[in-house]
Image (cartoon, helix red, strand yellow):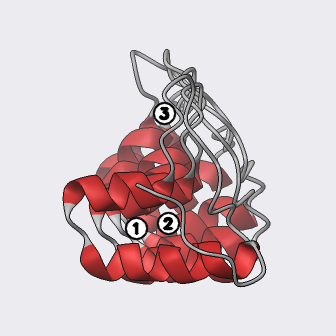
């Protein structure tokens, strides 16, 4: 923290970028106090790197709930997308960071946002076998029938392919409920 205070006293540009700005580095490292200090000095909470990623995305994929909350409290765009269409929720779900997923959902993250391949947070959590995250997403209305582009892969297919039995069971129940008690689709 002393290093950053010294930089601030020299009027360092807190938004200067090479490939990542200081806020992104601090966010991915989980350095809440540094993130707060950078924001207090005028760092752009929604700045994007050369791939369209944001500090919120970096903190989310790394699982830093407290940093995610600070960024959201300071106006980070919860549904921002990078150049591949991924959001903070998709990234946190892929890595199984349940606490971060809950924070993002509570702040209005689009549970059914799709990346450029049509992948959703539910698909990423299912493919990775993160049962608790799958439950949280389903409870918030995640579309169990969403399909990737162009392959038509669903969350159920992805979980089945990876052998995540508990997730498969959750998704089967969600599918059955979505079709009014009908039978589960072939996978």
Residue hosting label 1: 64
First along the sequence among labels 3 and 1: 3
Residue hosting label 2: 67
The quadrant in which residue 129 appears is: bottom left
Please indicate, yes or no, whether residue 153 appears anywhere in the rendered image: yes
x, y percent for residue 118: 59, 34
Q: Nearer the viewer, mark 2 or mark 3?
A: 2
x, y percent for residue 75: 78, 55
Most foreground residue, 20 or 40: 20
The quadrant in which residue 1 appears is: bottom left
Considering the image in quadrants, where does the C terminus appear? Answer: bottom left
Separation of marks 3 and 1 at Cα, in angstroms = 29 Å
Please indicate, yes or no, whether residue 140 appears anywhere in the rendered image: no
Above-or-below relation of 159 to 132:
above
Residue hosting label 3: 10
Crowding at dot 1, Cα within 10 Å, few <14 / some 14-19 / many 20+, comes out as: many
Give the number of the disc on residue 147: none
Most foreground residue, 164 or 35: 164
Crowding at dot 3, Cα within 10 Å, few <14 / some 14-19 / many 20+, comes out as: few
Crowding at dot 2, Cα within 10 Å, few <14 / some 14-19 / many 20+, comes out as: many
- The residue positioned 49% from the left and 19% from the top of the image is 51
- In this rendering, position of residue 89 left or right of residue 106: left
First along the sequence among labels 2 and 3: 3
- The residue positioned 54% from the left and 27% from the top of the image is 117
Q: Secondary structure at mark 2?
A: helix
Q: Nearer the viewer, mark 3 or mark 1?
A: 1
- In this rendering, position of residue 91 left or right of residue 152: left
x, y percent for residue 144: 62, 63
């Amino acid at each position: 923290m002393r290093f950053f205070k010294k930089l601030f006293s020299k009027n360092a540009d807190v938004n200067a970028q090479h490939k990542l700005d200081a806020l992104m580095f601090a966010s991915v490292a989980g350095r809440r106090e540094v993130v707060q200090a950078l924001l207090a000095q005028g760092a752009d909470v929604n700045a994007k790197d050369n791939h369209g990623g944001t500090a919120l995305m970096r903190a989310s994929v790394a699982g830093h709930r407290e940093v995610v909350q600070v960024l959201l409290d300071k106006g980070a765009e919860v549904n921002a997308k990078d150049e591949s269409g991924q959001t903070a929720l998709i990234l946190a779900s892929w890595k199984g960071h349940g606490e971060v997923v809950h924070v993002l959902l509570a702040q209005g993250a689009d549970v059914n946002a799709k990346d450029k391949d049509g992948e959703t947070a539910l698909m990423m959590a299912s493919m990775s076998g993160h049962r608790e995250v799958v439950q949280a997403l389903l409870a918030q209305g995640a579309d169990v029938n969403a399909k990737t582009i162009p392959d038509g892969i669903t969350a159920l297919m992805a979980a089945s392919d990876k052998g995540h039995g508990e997730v498969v069971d959750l998704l089967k129940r969600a599918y059955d409920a979505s079709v009014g008690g009908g039978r589960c689709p072939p996978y």
